[in-house]
Image (spheres, coloured by chain):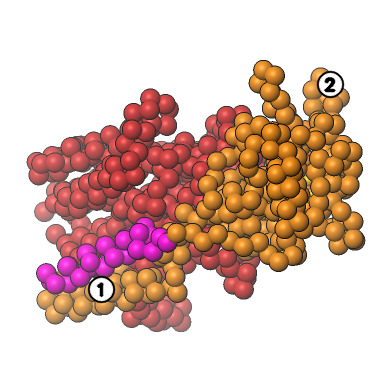
Chain colours: A orange, B red
Amino acid sequence: MGITRRAAICGLLTAGATATGITSTSAAVMPTPPADAVGLLYDTTLCIGCKACVVACQDANDLPRDPVGIDARYDAPVDLNYRAKNVIKLYHDGDQRSFVKVQCMHCIDPACVAACMLGALKKREFGIVSYDVNYCVGCRYCEVACPYGVPKFQWAAATPRIVKCELCNHRLAKGQEPACTEVCPRHAVIFGKRADLLKEAKRRLAENPGRYVPKIFGETDGGGTQVLYISHLPFDKLGFPALGDDPAPTLARSVQQGVYKGFVAPLALYGVLGMIAYRNRNKAEAEDAPHKGGTL
Amino acid sequence: MSTHAAPVGGPLVTTGTRLFAGIFGLGVIAIAWRLLLGLGSATALNDGYPFGLWIAFDVVTGAALACGGYAVGLLVYILNQGKYHPVMRPAMVTSALGYTLAGVGVGLDVGRWWSLWRVPLFFWRWNFNSALLEVALCIMAYIAVLWLRLAPALLEPYTSGPDSPWRRRAITFSRIIDKLSVPMIALGLVLATMHQSSLGTLMLLAGSRLHILWRTPMLPLMFLVSSISMGYAVVVFESAFSSVAFKRKPEIDMLAGLAGAMAPTLWVVVLLRVGDLAWRGQVGALFAGDGRAVMATLEIVFFLIPIVMLASPAQRRDLGNLVRAAMAMIFAGTLFRFDTFLVAFMPGANWSYFPSVPETAVTVGLVAFEVLAYVVIVKTFPILSGQTLAERQAL
Ligand code: SF4
Ligand code: SF4
Ligand code: SF4
């Protein structure tokens, strides 16, 4: 009995220790973008806030209008929602002001994809994080997971879906560029291969060091994103989260994989518990204790 | 003392059951509302708070409250404390009911509930990085294991009835379940260990949007251990409820023992919580004076309260005190889960969430259904063992 109990406690502690991932948390490795990764580059110094991209995005994605304001006469989504995959926000504080475009960042290692049970959200062609409604159960865990608050849900719909920018993959398939980059009169947002966009961002920063804060958002943030930003104001002011360089899903994944790598820990726990339960039952039968084997 | 479980008997329709049926009826109306008019109309959920009362309470807290079978199972089968065997069956009934209702909660919460069947079947699509997938699969399997293990008890009225082909089938079936009891016990314990800890992993994926006081790789272990404490608390509470409701002699020895088993688990939770904050250098965040710091402090205080209330053997033998301590414990575990899923989540200042009336009606209605089903089951099937007051007086 003494030995059995000690074995039981050891077993539980081991399981517990593994469950916390302390045995396995390793420093996250910087993920590499897919070879064909495409993305956007948005430059706050060029954007004039005309919102042409907002309307173009609604049209290209068959989204309904999003009327707000007095008598609902303004088609001006105030934030991403199930009718808006792309919005332009304004930051202003005294004489500091900047527009900022908001849409899915197409993370290299996306938290939304880590969340999704059957891979309704997945990185597909060109590294685009796209959505396949057939595998979505509407659990909204992607909304909880995304560090930028991008995926939105059709709350009012009887058969709700997740709505988010899929980098106009339907247009890319036809050889067109995304609607937002196509209409931008100032080329404040441009489309291209991520590698080229990164080069272009670095070039602009190098040529005009006084004009920009010395950072390309998305180069490494949260493991890197395929949508990149350069800005004349610090990124935290524009509403970007401070994520560090580890991919956003690192913490949860290291715990999850720490426990379930190769399914060893659960199987070991099963073996240990089964053995102890078996021995205890046999002993109880021998002693004819009240909980004689069998049912319950 | 009779060691055999027997149906409590008595009328199924009483003032009490009518009341609970009425509350459940209101819940059914709210469920219909949600199914016909959608989540947006029935709930206060929004894009900032996509998880709300149903996930935090019905699913996450509900599963922890349904840990009685797990907690007592560890005592009986693993720590070889055979004396607790009589509470095993009632604990399993509350577990089976609790988990089943947690499953119902998930079904109501997901937007595309008609697609849920794909989750267990489309194994080639399984994303093993998703803690939610693991929780979903484990809970589904666990519900099946719990009902299968209860099946012989639920079939007993038939297996001991008059002979018929069905009776013989029921007997064969019960024998098979009996033969498989050890593998099924071990499977149940592993499944419970897995999903109770993974429930604590869920919110870690929110990363920087989970407040630093809760953003720790220790969260799964704290969820696991506190679910065991809650399991004991619920069994104590449920035994006391049964003794009052069905006029039975309370099993004070056993309940005192369970309270004794609960105390170390509570200590582990508190020490993990405080130790983890110290280890991560975040003790200061407890004194930041903001709402989240206050909630985290309250959590720790409420975990300490039952420890104090159950410190001495005399306190553990006082039924009233036991019930109050169990309720404090249940409150602490519930608070911990609400904090992790709602309070600690930081979607941005422009979002807020407070459960709507229909949302609350569903939650309350499902709890009422659970009580109702428990009463009906113990009155009809051999679940509770021990002596009734009437039996004792007759002697
Ligand atoms: S920004 Fe959010 S929705 Fe877009 S890929 Fe990253 S995690 Fe997913
Ligand atoms: S809501 Fe749909 S897309 Fe989002 S995580 Fe759940 S199943 Fe995946
Ligand atoms: S890429 Fe397409 S969907 Fe995404 S913001 Fe631009 S226009 Fe909208």
Res. B187 image quadrant: bottom left
**Residue B390 visible to an observer of this rendering:** no
Quadrant where the image shows the C terminus of chain B: bottom left
Where disc 2 sits, the SS reads helix
> What's the residue at 55%, 41% (across, down)?
A242
Q: Chain of mark 2?
A: A
Magenta segment, which residues? A1-26
Instruction: Give the vertical position of B149 relative to A199 (above or below).
Output: below
Give yes or no for residue A12 being in the magenta stretch: yes
Quadrant where the image shows the N terminus of chain B: bottom left
Where disc 1 sits, the SS reads helix
Give yes or no for residue B32 being in the magenta stretch: no
Q: Residue furthest top?
A: A94
Q: Looking at the image, which is closer to me, B56 or B169?
A: B56
A80 left or right, relative to B90: right
Q: Please tell me which of labels 1 and 2 falls first in the chain.
A: 2
Report the residue marked by disc 1. A277
Measuring from the top left, give residue B362's x and y in whole percent: 54, 41
Measuring from the top left, give residue B250's x and y in whole percent: 19, 47
Numbered circles on residues, count: 2
> What's the residue at 17%, 50% (across, down)?
B260
Res. A78 image quadrant: top right
Q: Looking at the image, which is closer to me, B169 or B395?
A: B169
B86 left or right, relative to B381: left
Which numbered marker is on residue A71? 2
In the rendered structure, which amino acid carries the disc numbered 2? Asp
B131 left or right, relative to B181: right
In the rendered structure, which amino acid carries the disc numbered 1? Ala
Asked if disc 2 is less than 8 Å from ligand 3, the answer is: no
Please tell me whether the stretch drawn in magenta is mainly helix, strand or loop: helix
Q: Looking at the image, which is closer to me, B385 or A289?
A: A289
